[in-house]
Image: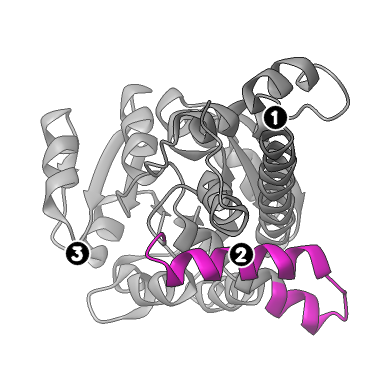
Amino acid sequence: MKVGFIGLGIMGKPMAHNVLKAGHTVIAYDHNQTPVDELVAAGAIAAANGREVAELADVVITMLPNSPHVRSALFDKDGVAEGLTAGKAVIDMSSIAPLASREFAQKLAEQGVDFLDAPVSGGEPKAIDGTIAVMVGGDETVFAKYEPLLKTMASTVTLVGGVGAGNITKLANQMIVAINIAAISEAYSLAKKAGVSPENVYKAIRSGLAGSVVMDQKSQKIFDGNFDPGFRIELHIKDLQNVLDTSHGVNVSAPFTSLAMEIMQSLKAHGHAKDDHSGIAEWYEMVNDLKLQD
């Protein structure tokens, strides 16, 4: 299959590599030429713009920061829509507003082009390993056609409903992850202030009811004080803004999400926007005047 890939950042680049390793032809484009050159060296084809990607590909994958970036990539001059013909498809793997996904699907349907919203979870390590989780919204027949392609990048690929449902599911995921990191950081802060090693607390409770994938993936970063980004705080802020906009639109109260958002906004104001979201622990260190490293 000829697969266009637009957006070769922390997540997109390793995902595109995995598509290439699976034997598909990859047509790559990004505003930053460096990851494009890296993919070309591995066997991909470089494109000059989104239109050229769409002209050469059977299906176009977008992996971009937010709704405006996807809209621009699809519908601006020399964008993807200009190169699409009936029977092709767009799979947007970005994490964006669900209503935007539905808008894009409707516009592309006028060209006879299929659309799936398929945001991912797992961060950079799982993107590299090809073990991300993909949550998909769209038509069942279209999903069945592209499920094998999505599985070249993921350990689980789940159809959760119609277009937009993938991003609703991703918003739920991001709520749980942010609140979980905050709860872990709060608990470790209590332990530290009370004279107990946070790392020993983790070892003692990780196999019990409090244990989670988030705890296992993020605790060591907290203990090491290593907040190099796998998923940046500024991107999690973007996701939580989409959560709050959506929750207000459907009259759902989300107080814990709101608190997590305020913690991350404070970290952004203190220069930590590009830290990994495990850096939520840094806020607890600031307000409690402690360090969580043993």
Distance, label 3 to label 1, CA atoms, is 57 Å
Circles 2 and 3: CB atoms closer than 8 Å = no
Q: Which residue is identified by label 2?
A: 263
Question: Given this view, does label 1 or label 2 mark the residue nearer the observer?
Answer: 1
The segment highlighted magenta reads 244-272
Residue 195's tag is 1
Badge 1: few (under 14), some or many (20 or more) residues near its Cα, within 10 Å? few
Most frequent secondary structure within the magenta stretch: helix
Question: Given this view, does label 2 or label 3 mark the residue nearer the observer?
Answer: 2
Q: Is 251 rendered above or below residue 23?
A: below
Q: Secondary structure at mark 3?
A: loop
Mark closest to the chain's N terminus, 3 or 1:
3
Give the residue type that dot 1 points to: Gly
The picture places residue 257, in percent across and down from the top left corner, at 74, 64
The picture places residue 284, in percent across and down from the top left corner, at 61, 52
> 226 or 197, which is in the foreground?
197
Q: Is 288 rendered above or below residue 201?
A: below
